[in-house]
Image (spheres, helix red, strand yellow):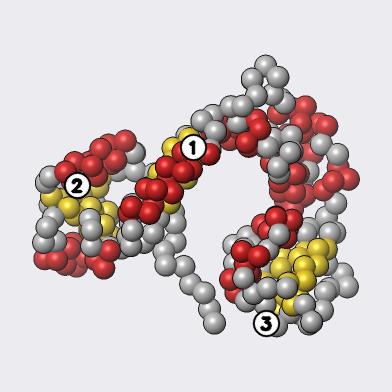
Amino acid sequence: MVVTLHSLPIFVRLEGRPVMLIGEGEAADAKRRLLERAGAVIFGEDAEATLAIVAMDDPDATVARLKARGVLINAVDRPDLCDFTLPAIVDRSPVIVAIGTGGVSAGLAAALRQRLEGILPAAIGSLAERLHAMRDGLRERFPEAGARRKAIAGMLVEGGSLDPFRHAGLVPASTAPQASSLVEEWPAEQVRGDDLVVITLTSLDPDDLTLRQTRALAQADRVLHAPGVPPAILDRARADAPRIVSPAPPVDPGDGLTVYLEMAR
């Protein structure tokens, strides 16, 4: 069985770009505020644009006209007509967390956003900027992409030198680790490129994965697995990590982190 995404989440830069907003009333006003916040240039139906938001009580005819022109549509409260939906947003710029339900339940998305607002540190965006400043130093110290990715993951892990919930706004800037020192001091032996992690699954439910197993899947450069490992568990790995069916763990895992998944007998 192939597990498919309901929608592919993407972040679109709208600053200076035309977007159609069609309709009036409270729903249209809310969408206008959101578009203005993103820097979009708002037009009516006669404009040339690739995106449109339709906030009307009876949108079918308008949506049909726009779709015939190749315009991607968000129809408020009509998920059956939508090409894209607008998520609930937690803004910690440049960190943005988007919660979507495919238009099924805006209330649930809003409730999740409120929970995350209370969990994510207010200054987590500053941590993102610090990581950006480390890029050149990390590339120089760890030229191989897998080693570099592992070093970053080690810094961000719970209790790590850049634990997001420890250093994002919770530690004064004067005492927080500096980017240059973190790169210089990070031990090279912690990023060896030939690691193999074997995970023996005792459950078909991905929610039963341990924190360590989940972390390994998220960091894996490739995932080998025995037949019968469910797609729901394979989906916990990085999207760009290849999935390879194998009856046994590899003798030579190759560079980077390899995770082998097998079912308990």
Contact? badges 1 and 3 (CB < 8 Å): no
Q: Quadrant of the N terminus?
A: bottom right
The one of 21 and 262 positioned closer to us in this rendering: 262
Q: Residues within 10 Å of mark 2 (few under 14, many from 20)?
A: some
Instruction: Tell me how far mark 3 sits from mark 2, CA to CA.
Output: 47 Å
What whole-number distance in Å separates the C-alpha atoms at marks 1 and 2? 26 Å
Where the C terminus falls, by quadrant? Answer: bottom right
Q: Choose mark 1 or mark 2, whichever is in front.
A: 1
Provide residue 157's location: percent of width, then percent of height. Answer: 71, 44
Residue at left offset 42%, top offset 45%? 113
Residue 60, percent from left and from top = 14, 66
What amino acid type should be assigned to the residue bearing mark 1? Answer: Gly
Among the two numbered marks 3 and 2 on one chain, the one whose residue lies closer to the N terminus = 2
Q: Position of residue 201 (x, y in %)?
A: 73, 72
Residue 99 on image: x %, y %: 43, 51
* Residue at (83% x, 74% y) in the render: 249
Identify whether 188 is placed above or below 72. Answer: above
Mark 1–mark 3 distance (CA, rounded to whole Å): 39 Å
Q: Amino acid at mark 2?
A: Ala
Instruction: Identify the residue at image location x=74%, y=34%.
Output: 161
| Disc 3: which residue | 228
